[in-house]
Image: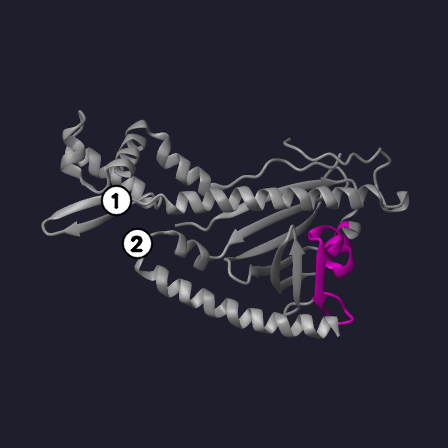
């Protein structure tokens, strides 16, 4: 079965550079992505491998950045401590008539979809794998939070 | 103009596509209410061949809405609405969360100094379907 994904497009009257700053500058990203957004970052900004925590609408998600295409795209996986994981891709595109466009795609992780189909022989294994990943991820994100708080 | 068109999902097309056919919908509802049934029993109720019923059940199964189980010499079909329920719940919840994030983003863009805005028009911080 194909993956479950959600797609949104936002057209803006700002340059792609201005929009990219709102996506790739953790402080600016934090102004709209969630109520409380923290990233463990290098002085160069967001890079693949960067970890963070996003609290939005009372939901805490651990974040792992896996793709940074400067000026174009930011990709990350995020997950709740006891919930499913999903991957988010934020793409910055120049508009033909001026301005820019933000393409948002959130895709539910395969393992999360697998647990949704009842009677699947792989579901239990997939769930066990996901739980393991989440536990490891949560431990690692807690370390990040501790580092950030300190 | 800053705008955010409504969300799209191919998976919903897939799930609802499978349920768009009245016969498939009737078979899915019957399985939901009456529990597992064989294609023979399901075909007996309608003016359809057993083969036609099996084809519809396989279409439901391909979308994750039904599955088959072998009981002795019979193959029984079972409704599996969990994926539909979970997918719809996830899409509705995530969609609402992105609405709020986009609203905040539009607010940020609207608050930017003029120099950072390329177009000379007034910023419009509206969110909604196209």
Q: How crowded is mark 2: few (under 14 residues within 10 Å), some or many (20 or more)?
A: some
Residue A18, x across and y down, in percent? 80, 51
Question: Is residue B43 found left or right of A75 in the rendered image?
Answer: left
Question: Disc 1, disc 2: CB below 8 Å?
Answer: yes
Q: In this view, does B52 lie above or below A40?
A: above
SS class, disc 1: strand
- Residue A95 in sight from this viewpoint: no
The residue at the point 18 percent across, 34 percent down is B42
User: Who's the residue at 89% across and 42% down the image?
Assistant: B114
User: Within the image, what quadrant is residue A46 found in?
Assistant: bottom right
Image mark count = 2
Around disc 1, counting alpha carbons within 10 Å, would you say few (fewer than 14), some (14 to 19), or many (20 or more)?
Answer: many
Q: Which residue is label 2 attached to?
A: A119
Q: How far apart are marks 1 and 2 (CA)?
A: 10 Å
Q: Which of A143 and A11 is in front in this view?
A: A143
Residue assigned mark 1: B78
Outermost residue, front direction? A58
Q: Residue A77: tell me if it is visible.
A: yes
B5 relative to A136, above or below: above
């Amino acid at each position: 079965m194909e993956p479950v994904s959600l797609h949104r497009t936002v057209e803006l009257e700002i340059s792609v550079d201005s929009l990219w700053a709102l996506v790739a500058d953790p402080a600016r990203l934090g102004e709209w992505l969630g109520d409380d957004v923290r990233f463990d970052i290098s002085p160069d900004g967001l890079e693949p491998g960067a970890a963070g925590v996003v609290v939005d609408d009372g939901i805490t998600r651990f974040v792992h950045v896996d793709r940074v295409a400067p000026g174009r795209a930011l990709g990350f996986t995020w997950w709740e401590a006891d919930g499913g994981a999903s991957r988010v891709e934020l793409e910055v595109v120049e508009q033909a008539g001026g301005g820019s466009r933000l393409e948002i795609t959130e895709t539910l992780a395969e393992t999360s979809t697998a647990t949704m189909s009842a009677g699947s022989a792989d579901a239990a294994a997939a769930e066990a794998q996901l739980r393991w990943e989440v536990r490891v991820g949560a431990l690692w994100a807690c370390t990040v939070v501790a580092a950030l708080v300190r | 103009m800053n705008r955010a068109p409504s969300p799209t999902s191919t998976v919903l097309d897939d799930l609802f596509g499978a349920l768009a056919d009245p016969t498939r919908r009737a078979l899915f509802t019957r399985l939901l209410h009456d529990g597992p049934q064989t294609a023979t029993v399901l075909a007996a109720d309608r003016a359809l061949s057993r083969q036609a019923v099996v084809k519809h059940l396989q279409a439901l199964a391909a979308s994750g809405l039904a599955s088959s189980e072998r009981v002795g010499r019979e193959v029984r079909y079972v409704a599996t609405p969990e994926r539909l329920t979970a997918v719809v719940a996830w899409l509705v919840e995530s969609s609402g969360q992105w609405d709020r994030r986009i609203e905040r983003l539009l607010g940020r863009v609207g608050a930017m100094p003029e120099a950072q805005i390329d177009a000379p028009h007034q910023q419009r911080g509206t969110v909604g379907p196209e």
